[in-house]
């Protein structure tokens, strides 16, 4: 239970850290063992540092599906709901026949779709990613609302212990999908324990298949069993058949409730390949110690730049901004690499301090639904920030260093003259140039209107979207970022040398 709660709480904190105050690399530890993200990251990077899924498989080959009862946050969430259900309804479980055809059909379809080059089934069914979306799309807005309400209340007493954080709305489709998944999982666990894990979850089915070959399995010692049925009534996987003194170990999620409830110690781990030896080696499964490190998680840029608000825009423009491709995050290398590896867990969305990462709808196509994209209407990519590359557990966003990130060209800024208020209103502006970190956007005098207008140096533009975010025009932007389907390398901006004061001169005042 301690291990399970440690995983659940640490992952929950990751997603609900609305002040971005967690130490750097904190995400590495609880996310290392998340099966699907780890698998995708290993296929992408090929290093043992991304091989948490192999650790899960080894443990499964030894002891069965311990992952499902400890490291899987959605599994632990189901246990909490089942616990509440038992307290309210005094619910008791009974043995149920396995829905073998259903769960293996889902697993086979998931694998075939993945082998065909799409991760859409992973996106929809991966338990970790569904848990992440539930937190980021349902609970994070609630936490922000509570935080801001408390901050407002305290401010009336001149207390500033808590400060309000910016809320930039929600993506309706992702919210509705998360509510739907949460409702289905919640109803299944409230009524039937781990039914979701043993019918829908492809990770649970896959690990259940592997557990058929595990060295140790939970079994019933008939000489000690008095057929009281207590173990069957506490089994939330519905896999203990006391009438036949058998346990469907393929569906067992190793919660060990049967161990603690059995008064005659008739249930124990047995060495699978020595069935005649009734008193085989017993594994001490009473809550193993599992140390999870905490390290420093530093958010480099928590302050969000504001767009130019002082420029009055009273005339709407007419030319819509049409972006052929969505802009993928820095470190994703290309749209194809990103969509092939992203499980849409939304941890990067929750961790992004400028909120530029938002769930997509159809911007990546139907198969990339809910995968994060750069939304320059809601934010921009901070020039110094690499947080999304540090927290991504699946390798969809590869780790990058701050200096190398500054040269990654996600896209190129494009200027739509007929949308710009310099031309439509004959008004001075310059918000885009003011916010450009590389000075790829400069204001240059246009004799046509006798005012300064934006001019773009595409070679040093990194596509961060600060110009687009800052552009005040309505309803369409006058400057926007056109995506690079494969990220390119921008040139270094020319560093202007500052004039050095002559220290030998007398102080001028």
Image: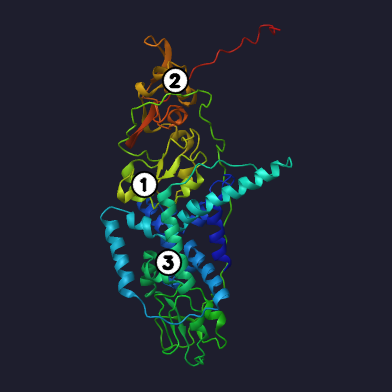
Q: Earlier in the sequence, mark 3 or mark 2?
A: 3
Please name which of the two marks, 3 or 1, marks the residue nearer to the observer: 1
Q: Earlier in the sequence, mark 1 or mark 2?
A: 1
For label 3, the residue is 58
Say few, some or many: other residues with alpha carbon within 10 Å of mark 1 (under 14 / 14 to 19 / 20 or more): some
Tell me, for residue 361, which label it has, or none.
Answer: 1
In this view, 446 is above or below 66:
above
Q: Is residue 223 visible?
A: yes
For label 2, the residue is 494
Q: Nearer the viewer, residue 341 or 302?
A: 302
Say few, some or many: other residues with alpha carbon within 10 Å of mark 3 (under 14 / 14 to 19 / 20 or more): some
Q: Is residue 490 visible?
A: no
Q: Residue at x 32, y 66 (%)?
A: 107
**Is 113 on the left-hand or right-hand side of 176?**
left
User: Mark 1: which secondary structure?
Assistant: loop
User: Mark 3: which secondary structure?
Assistant: helix
Q: Residue at x 37, y 70 (%)?
A: 199
In this view, 72 is above or below 238:
above
Q: Earlier in the sequence, mark 3 or mark 1?
A: 3
Please name which of the two marks, 1 or 2, marks the residue nearer to the observer: 1
User: Mark 2: which secondary structure?
Assistant: loop
Q: Nearer the viewer, residue 405 or 79?
A: 79
């Amino acid at each position: 239970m301690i291990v399970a709660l440690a995983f659940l709480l640490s992952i929950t904190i990751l997603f609900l850290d609305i002040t971005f105050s967690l130490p750097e690399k904190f995400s590495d530890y609880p996310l290392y063992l998340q099966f699907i993200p780890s698998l995708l990251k290993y296929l992408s990077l090929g290093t043992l540092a991304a091989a948490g899924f192999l650790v899960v498989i080894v443990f499964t080959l030894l002891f069965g599906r311990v992952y499902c009862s400890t490291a899987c946050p959605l599994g632990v969430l189901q246990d909490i709901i089942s616990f509440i259900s038992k307290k309210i309804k005094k619910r008791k479980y009974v043995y149920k026949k396995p829905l073998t055809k259903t769960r293996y059909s889902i697993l086979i379809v998931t694998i075939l779709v993945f082998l065909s080059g799409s991760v859409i089934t992973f996106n929809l069914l991966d338990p970790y990613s569904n848990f992440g979306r539930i937190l980021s799309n349902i609970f994070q807005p609630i936490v922000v609302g509570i935080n801001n309400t408390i901050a407002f209340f305290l401010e009336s007493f001149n207390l500033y212990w808590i400060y309000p954080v910016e809320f930039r709305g929600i993506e309706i489709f992702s919210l509705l999908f998360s509510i739907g998944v949460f409702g289905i999982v919640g109803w299944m666990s409230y009524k039937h324990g781990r039914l979701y894990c043993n019918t829908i979850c492809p990770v649970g089915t896959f690990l259940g298949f592997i557990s058929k070959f595990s060295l140790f399995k939970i079994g019933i010692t008939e000489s000690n069993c008095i057929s009281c049925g207590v173990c069957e009534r506490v089994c939330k996987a519905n896999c203990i058949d006391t009438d036949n003194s058998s346990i469907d170990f393929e569906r067992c999620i190793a919660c060990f409730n049967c161990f603690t409830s059995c008064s005659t110690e008739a249930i124990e781990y047995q060495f699978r390949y020595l069935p005649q030896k009734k008193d085989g080696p017993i594994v001490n499964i009473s809550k193993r110690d599992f140390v999870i490190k905490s390290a420093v998680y530093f958010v480099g840029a928590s302050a969000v730049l504001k767009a130019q608000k002082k420029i009055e825009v009273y005339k709407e423009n007419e030319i819509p901004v049409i972006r052929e491709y969505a802009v993928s995050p820095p470190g994703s290398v290309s749209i194809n690499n990103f969509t092939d590896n992203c499980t849409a867990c939304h941890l990067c969305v929750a961790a992004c301090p400028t909120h530029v990462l938002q769930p997509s709808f159809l911007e990546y196509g139907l198969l990339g639904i809910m995968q994060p994209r750069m939304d320059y209407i809601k934010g921009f990519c901070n020039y110094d920030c690499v947080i999304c590359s540090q927290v991504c557990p699946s390798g969809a966003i590869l780790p990058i260093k701050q200096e190398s990130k500054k040269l990654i060209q996600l896209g190129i800024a494009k200027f739509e003259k007929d949308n710009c208020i310099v031309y439509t209103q004959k008004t001075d502006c310059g918000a885009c140039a003011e916010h450009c970190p590389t000075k790829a956007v400069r204001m240059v005098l246009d004799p046509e209107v006798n005012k300064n207008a934006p001019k773009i140096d595409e070679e040093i533009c990194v596509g961060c979207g600060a110009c687009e975010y800052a552009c005040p025009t309505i309803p369409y932007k006058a400057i926007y970022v056109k995506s690079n389907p494969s990220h390119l390398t921008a040139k270094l901006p020319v560093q202007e040398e500052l004039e050095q004061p002559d220290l030998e001169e007398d102080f001028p005042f």
